[in-house]
Amino acid sequence: MKKVPAILFALIFICHSGMVSAQQPDYEKYGKIAIAAVQADYPGEAVTDYQYMGRKNVGTGLVEDSFLFTVNENGKRVKPLVKVKHSTINNKLLNLTVEETSGQIPR
């Protein structure tokens, strides 16, 4: 009888853990858009690294997600920073910028 609650608890924990890990980060949609922008700006070049730099609130219901890439362009490493401004209210993209950084990451 004591094993039934323990087994039930274990099943609930496993099911809950599976649901939590299946959720996607809310910036994933905009990360895919950022990847497409970098691939368009550097066609045929290898994107070797990708890092989510974080989110900044820029107004009521507006945020800006930043993504840093490493691209090998003609044998030279460049680091484009993609900033994606979007609405958290209606999930619409408002603005996208791509700028090359020179080692220093602008905020």
Image: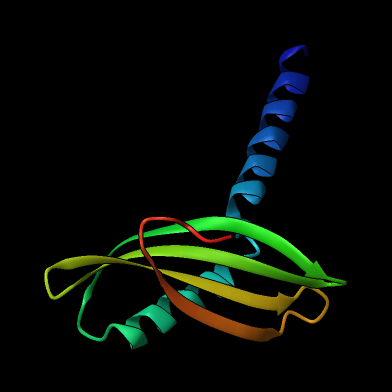
Q: Quadrant of residue 58?
A: bottom right
Q: Where residue 86 sits: x, y (%)?
A: 70, 78
Question: Where the N terminus falls, by quadrant?
Answer: top right
In the rendered image, residue 78, in percent from the top left (x then y), is placed at 28, 67
Residue at the left extreme, as displayed: 75
Residue at (72%, 36%) from the top-left corner?
12
Q: Residue at x 70, y 61 (%)?
A: 56
Above-or-below relation of 36 to 58 = below
The answer to which of 4 and 23 lies nearer the viewer is 23
Residue at 35 percent across and 88 percent down: it is: 40
Colour option used: rainbow
The location of residue 99, given as percent across then percent down, is: 44, 75
Residue at 49% of width from left, 64% of height from top? 67
Q: Horizontal and vertical percent for residue 18?
A: 61, 46
Quarter of the view holding residue 3: top right
- Horizontally, is 69 left or right of 42 in the view? right
The vertical placement of 9 against 28, above or below, is: above
Horizontal relation, residue 76 to residue 93: left or right: left
* Outermost right residue: 60
How many numbered circles does the render carry?
0
Q: Residue furthest top?
A: 2
Foreground residue among 91 and 22: 91
